[in-house]
Image (cartoon, grey):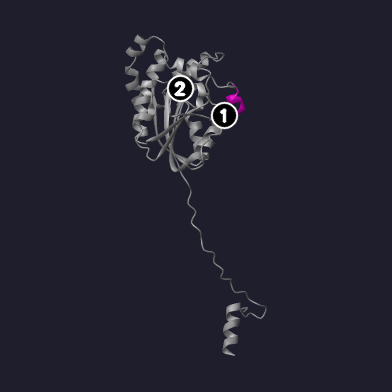
Amino acid sequence: MKRLFNRITTPPTTAALRSWFSTPPGRELLALEQACLEHLLSECFGYYLLQVGCLGLQMDPLRMSRIKSQVVLVPKEEDAYSAQCVVGDPQYLPVASDSIDTVLLSHTLDFSRNPHQLLREVGRVLIPEGHVVIVGFNPWSLWGLWRLLRMRSRQVPWCGHFISSWRVHDWLSLLGFEIKAEEGVMFRPPLRHEGMLQRLGFLERLGRRLWPPLSGVYVILAVKRVSRLTPIKPAWKLPARRIRSGMVEPTANNMRHTKGRE
């Protein structure tokens, strides 16, 4: 665990992340994520929606949700951009337990100091049967290959964790979540030439049909399950034991009936 996440001692600034999402590959990625989140967030209902982090102001996934009470948690006061924003530490969410219906993590795990701790906090604040939507970079993709070629780079987004979806599945399972849906987006390489990205748009259709696990980004919808224990009534009836003479040793009930007859 420590070896996997030692590359990010301090998360990159929100300004740096927003700046990259303003580049051609960043804008293309946000547009695809927006369409995917429109579909998945439509399945989430309730009273409160919490978005942890805000990477790109070009995308506003909360406007697609049917949940009216929405809050965006940002790490610093200068990151706030609207009245919906509150300042807090994502590692220790300033939210009461079992109080949130849906949590949105848009690349939040990719740039978190401790992604597993953040997921534990999400599990704590979600109500039973609440939903979490996770957007993350896929290391087993062209984007993951670009990251390998820039291993020494501290630039966004290549300095991120790029946690595989199967690892996220494993973490969610340990925390009592069940995967409800998963979609992959962005099968094109992260080229900075906007015209080339547009010409490679056919890869999106081919990728979704032929190699969905190799998408540059995955979007996971999971639900918090709560085990319901069914109490089993104990059987207090004691088995009869035989004594040396071959007779059955009387139980307390038999002795009571015998005294009654006397």
Residue, x 43% and y 17% (percent of image)? 21
List the residue tagged with mark 2. 55
Residue at 40%, 40% (x, y): give it.
47
> At numbered mark 1, what does the secondary structure look like: helix, strand or loop?
loop
**Could you classify mark 1 by the number of other residues whose Cα lies within 10 Å: few (under 14), some (14-19), or many (20 or more)?**
some
Residue at the farthest bottom position: 262
* Magenta segment boundaries in residue numbering: 1-6
Percent position (x, y) of residue 96? Answer: 51, 40
- The residue under label 1 is 114
Circle 1: residue type: Asn
> 25 or 238, which is in the foreground?
25
Label count reads: 2
Q: Residue at x 59, y 85 (%)?
A: 258
Question: Quick one: which residue is furthest to the right in this view?
Answer: 244
**Distance Cα–Cα, label 2 vs label 1:** 18 Å
Q: Is residue 212 magenta?
A: no
Which quadrant, please, contains the C terminus? bottom right
At label 2, the amino acid type is Leu
Badge 2 vs badge 1, beta-carbon distance below 8 Å: no
Q: Position of residue 117 (x, y in %)?
A: 56, 33
Q: Secondary structure at mark 2?
A: loop
Q: Is residue 2 magenta?
A: yes
